Image: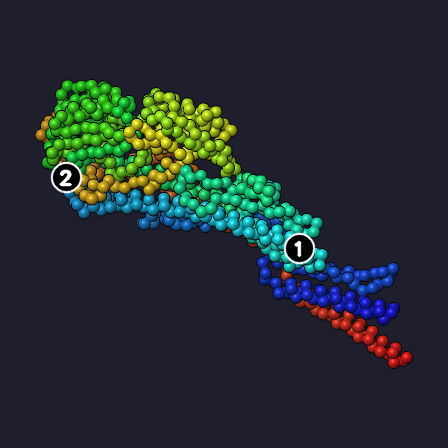
Amino acid sequence: MSINSILGNALSGLNASQLALRSTSTNISNVNTPAYARSQANITSRNVVGAGLGVDAASLTRITDRFLFATSLSANGDAAAGEAKAGLLDRVQAQFGTLDDPGSLFARLNTAFAEIGSAALDPASGVRRLTAVSDVQFLFDEFTRLQGELLTARSEAQRQIGFSIERANALISEISSLNGDITRGRIQGDATGAENRQDALITELSSLIDIKVDRTADGGAVLRTSDGILLLGQFPLTIEGPGAGPGNLGQTFAPIQGRTPSGNVIELQSHFKSGTIRGYLDLRDRELPALTLELAEFAAGAADALNAAHANASAVPAPTTLQGRNTGLLSADALNFTGKTSLALTDTAGALVRRVDIDFDAGTLSVDGGAPTAFGATVGGITTALNTALGALGSASFTNGKLSLSATGTNGVSLVQDATTPSDRAGRGFAHFFGLNALVTSALPTQFETGLSGTDAHGLAGGGSITFNVTGPDGRTAATINVPVTGVSINDYLAALNNTTTGVGRFVTFSLDASGRLVQTPTVGAENYQVEPSADSTARGTTGLSFTQLFGLGEGVLGTRGAAFAVRSDIANNPDKLAMAKLELTTTTAIGDVVLGSGDGRGGEAIASALSKSRLFQNAGSLSGVSSTLSDFSGRFATDVGSRASRAARQSDAAISLRSEAEQRLANKQGVNIDEELALMTQYQQSYNASARLIQAAKELTDTLLSII
C-alpha cells in the first residue's frame, strides 16, 4: 500500500468521524427538544477494484418512522379538539353552577318560588313581598347573564377559529418554504435541521387541523387533510374563513374554504375532522347553540308558569288597568276560546262593583248575573262586548295586538278562571293568553302557541317577504331563498313556503299544529340541512310583529328569549301590586260583597305551586319536548349542562392519553438516548484518534524514507 493510500484512508476516516461526532453532539444538545429526531452519519466502506480505499460519509439522515409519526399527528389532532371543547364547556358549566350551589340559576329558581310562598303566608307583609319580587327579578337577571355568557363563549369560539386559521396559513407557508431547504440540504449532505424544524411545524399544524403527510423523492412534505384534500403540494393552499364576530343565534358564518394560487376555491370545513378548528366549530355550531336554546326554553317556561298563576290572581286593591301583551292577533281573528272566565271591577276595599261572566262555549256573557248576550266569534267581538258590559265603570280595547282592560276612578279590575271549565286557547286561559296581569313581561312574543288555524287570514302586508339561508352539511350555503307574502290565509303562505321550486320545500315543510304553533319538518333526504331565516320584512297588520316573531321561526327568535324577561315595572317599583289574593266569586255573590281580601294569600300560594305544576316544554337543543314540571325541567337542564362538560372532559382525557402514548412510542423510535449517544461519541473519538495516528504513522514513514535518501 502506498503512502498516498494510507493518507487517503486516514483522511476519509477523519472526515467520517468528524461528521459522526457532529451528529452525535447535535443529538445530545437536543435531548429534550420536542419533535426532534436523532440523526446518524451514513458511513460506508469505499472499495475500488477489490481494494479498500477508506470510507464515505457524505450525508446525515434522521432516524424516524413515518407510520408512528402519522399516528402521532392523528392523536395530536384528536387531543387538541378535545381540549378545546372541554376547556370552554368547563368554563360554561362553572357559570351555571350545580343544583346545590346557593348562587346558581337552579337554586335561584327554587328560592324565587319559595319566597312567593312565604309571602303568601303573610300577605300583608311588605318586606316579604319586596323579597319575593326581588328574588323573581334576580332569577331573570341570572337568565340574562347566562345567555350573555353563552353568546360570549360562542363569540370566543368563533374568534379562536379565526386565530387558528391564521396560524394554520402561517404554518403551511413555512412548511412549504422548508421544502426548498430540505432539497438543498440533501444535495449538500445534511438536511436534518430543516427536516426537524419542518416536523415540529407539521406537529403544530396537526393540532389545528387533521393532516396526513407524504414525502416527495427529494424529501419535501406534501400535506393533505385526513380524507385527501390537498393543502400543500407544489404550492400552499390559503385557508379562508370568518373572522371574529358576535355569537348571536341565527347568524350565518362564512364557510371555511381553501383558495389555490390560481384563485380556485375548495370547500374545507366538512373535511376538518379533528384539531382545534374542528373542536371550536362543534362548539360554535352545535354545543353552544343547543345550550342557548335550552336556556331560552327554560326561561320562557319559568316566566309562563309565573304569569299563568299571577293572571288568575289579584293584588289588593286591584290594579286600575290591565295592559296585555302583543299577541300578534288582529281584531278579525277567530276567538277560538273554550270554557269560562269571570271579570270583576272592585273598589279599594275589595267590594264588587261590576261582574262579567264569559262563557266562550256558548259565545255569551252576562253582566251582574243578568241575561246572557252574544259577543260573536272574533277578538274584536269580545272586545266590543266587554266594553259595552263595563259601561261607564270601565272600558276594554284591543289595539296593535294588545288587549287592555280598565276601571274608572279608583276602582280596580281583575279576572279569575272558572273552577270547573276554565277558559282555554292553545293551552292558556283568557287573561294568561292576552298577558293580562302578567308578573313577568317581555317586549316580544316568547310563547308561540298562537291559537291560529290555517284558515285564518295571515294579515301580512303585501310587499313583505322572508329570506331563508340554507346551509348544507359541509357548512356551505346551499341556497338563499326569498319567499314573498302571497295569498290571503295562513295556509296560502305556508303553501308558498313549502313550494319545492320557489320556496324551501326541498329542505323543510311547515305546518300548524292544533295549538297554532308552527312545526318545521325536514324533507326526506335533507335532514342534515339547516334552514334559517336571515331576513324578514313581513308585518302582521298593525301589530308590528313579523311572521318569524309571531310563530317563533328560527334560532334567532327562539334563542333570544333567555334575556327577554323582567318583572313588570309597576310591580318592581311597588311590590304591594304583587297579586297575592284571588277573586272569590260564587253564584250567590252580589254587588257590594267583598270579593278581594288583603289577608288572602291564595293567589300567592298558586304562584308558588306553579313550580311543581306540569306544563308543556317544546324541543330545545338536545332536550326533547315533554310535559314536565318546571322543577323537573330545571333538573333536566342542569344535567344536560353538566353532562356536556363531563362528556367533553372524558373524551379529552382519553384523547390526551392516546396522544401521550403515541408520542412516547415515536420518541422511543426517534428520540435521543443520552447513554447511547455518549457511547457513540467515545467510539467516534477513538475512530478519529485512530485516523489521526495513521496520518502520524504515514508522516513518520515519509520522514524515515527521506532520511534514507
Vertical side of 65 occupied by 581: above or below: above
Residue sitting at x 32%, y 28%? 540
Q: CA distance from mark 2 to mark 1?
A: 89 Å
Left or right? Give the position of 431 relative to 684: left
Look at label 1 and name its amino acid. Answer: Ile
Of the two numbered discs 2 and 1 in the rendering, the one whose residue sits closer to the viewer: 1
Q: Residues within 10 Å of mark 1 (few under 14, many from 20)?
A: many
Q: Residue lying furthest bottom in this view?
A: 707
Image quarter (top left, top right, bottom left or bottom right) of the C terminus: bottom right
Q: Quadrant of residue 292?
A: top left
Residue sitting at x 31%, y 40%? 564
Q: Which mark is residue 182?
A: 1
Q: Quadrant of residue 406?
A: top left
Vertical side of 356 occupied by 218: above or below: below
* Residue 180 spot, x, y in % from top left: 65, 53
Left or right? Give the position of 592 relative to 469: left
Q: Nearer the viewer, residue 199 or 372?
A: 199
Q: Which mark is residue 599?
A: 2
Look at label 2 and name its amino acid. Answer: Gly
Q: Is residue 664 visible?
A: no
Secondary structure state at the residue bearing disc 2: loop
* Residue 542 spot, x, y in % from top left: 28, 29
Image quarter (top left, top right, bottom left or bottom right) of the N terminus: bottom right
User: Which comes sooner in the sequence, label 2 or label 1?
Assistant: 1
